[in-house]
Image (spheres, helix red, strand yellow):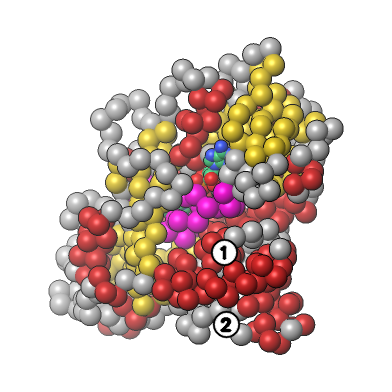
Amino acid sequence: MLQAAGDAAIQWDMIVIGGGATGLGVALDAAARGYRTLLLEQGDFAEGTSSRSTKLIHGGVRYLRNGELGLVRDSLRERGRLLRNAPHLVRPLAFVVPGYRWYEPFYYGAGLTAYDWLSGRLGIGRTRPLSHGGVVERIPNLRRAGLRGGTLYWDGQFDDARLAIALAKTAAARGATVLNHAPVVELIKESGRVTGVLARDRLGGVEIRARGRVVVNATGVFADGVRRLDDPASESVIEPSQGIHLVLDAGFLGGDTAVMIPKTDDGRVLFAIPWHGRLVVGTTDTDGVPVSTDPRPLEAEIDYLIAHVGRYLERVPTRADVKATFAGLRPLVRPKSAAAATKSISRDHSLFVSDSGLVTITGGKWTTYRKMAEDTVDRAAAVGGLPMQPCLTGDLTLLDRNPGEALAAENPDWRERLDPELPWTVADAVAAVRDEMAATVDDVLARRTRVAFLDEAAARRCEPRVAEILRREV
Ligand SMILES: Cc1cc2nc3c(=O)[nH]c(=O)nc-3n(C[C@H](O)[C@H](O)[C@H](O)COP(=O)(O)OP(=O)(O)OC[C@H]3O[C@@H](n4cnc5c(N)ncnc54)[C@H](O)[C@@H]3O)c2cc1C
């Protein structure tokens, strides 16, 4: 990848800056259409927001409440496609909305039936009412006092960083060059047009100068910074909003059904979701946080989540029960009205084309990455004067091979787990380095396996072992 990226003889059709859900989706779409595509990511694939989501492929029940029917319908269509095109990475998950007020089971039952209805043929399970006993059977640790029943509905769940790696691999299989640990530091301009990028290989120190017919800025919350490389006076379009999650033992719900609280006291949505044998609780919506490559949860956000989830549980978690936390920054598009709170800003995506032809795509959701990519490549192809080709990703299957399994079959010693409490093996770590471009301990522990997201103490214990594997393999 490094060699191809640095080959000055290549004239790329499309250069994509940013290797999160959006950039990887664009690179795959462009490569599938036959465009010569280069993607450059400053850190690791999905190191930004795209590994820090709530892990839901969903229409967004909350957006239904906001009346964003178009966004919900498009998202549900994409959910259906993802379940079909990546069944190894996205799965249907049952959710319960508990009702503690007499009208809640009716109110949420009606809303969630509309949600089913909007998904049409791509629905994944029928919404139905649950009795008090039915709720408790599915969520044994849910608070029972005052529980009147609930509503069961279905949505999609996934492993965000793994889906990103699958996109990178599928794009590469379609001929794209995708390179991680290579920040773009400058845009090359000729006669007022953006004609390429200057990037640096962070690991080897090599400078990469790449020329392209069109450059796409898919850098999430960093999009304003890249736009200013093009035009220092360009106005800011991003309004970042931080969301954090806590990871607890799965026993804090019991069972494998998720819980959705549609409206906490301050009007937010709260999820508690079983994931990789643990429980993920989130999220928050905090504006005014600085843009950073490694955002950290604020103490107040952790306290808020512990307090709020505790209100709905019999056995209540404390700070000592938190196995891990993670924070992500939503790349929301700044609304025209400066007064809007970030939780009310639309999750729809926006495209901007600068006078010099830099195409910026931002906003959106993981769930809609494919549609965002389709819209972006259509627009970028026109800006770059590329021959129009139809989008092919609607039913393109994403690669699913788990290289760890094959390696474990060859080397029984590598079946040993990295940590006794988590599913990943030595073979998974070796495969991450050999087949999945993992180049640092963090790449392996945070995004090829998800150890660091699930258990910070376990990740620290695994570090020397993974470092040793990297030393041997790289
Ligand atoms: C708390 C939270 C929960 C969420 N939950 C969900 C959910 O459950 N379902 C859902 O559908 N969506 C969810 N989202 C939204 C979703 O995660 C984001 O919309 C999506 O991940 C954004 O992807 P992106 O590629 O635009 O940004 P990012 O993932 O941030 O990718 C941008 C990339 O650009 C790179 N970059 C920046 N500058 C440069 C440069 N100069 N050179 C090279 N690379 C550069 C960054 O390193 C980064 O990797 C959630 C978001 C948050 C914050």
Vertical side of 408 occupied by 12: above or below: above
- In percent of width and height, residue 17 lies at 61, 38
Which residue is at a point 30% across and 26% down the rendered structure image?
337
Residue 22 is at least partly visible in this image: no
Left or right placement of residue 391 versus residue 250 in this view: right
Q: Nearer the viewer, residue 227 or 82?
A: 227
Gap between marks 2 and 1 measured at Cα: 16 Å
- In percent of width and height, residue 309 lies at 25, 67
Q: Which residue is mark 1?
A: 441
Q: Which mark is residue 128?
A: none
Which residue is at a point 54% across and 55% down the rendered structure image?
79
Whether ligand 1 has any atom under 8 Å from the Cβ at mark 1 is answered as no
Quadrant of residue 54 within the rendered picture: bottom left
Q: Which residue is mark 2?
A: 417
**Residue type of the residue flagged with mark 2:** Arg
Specify the segment rendered in magenta: 43-65
Label 1: how many Cα within 10 Å (few below 14, some 14–19, many 20+): many
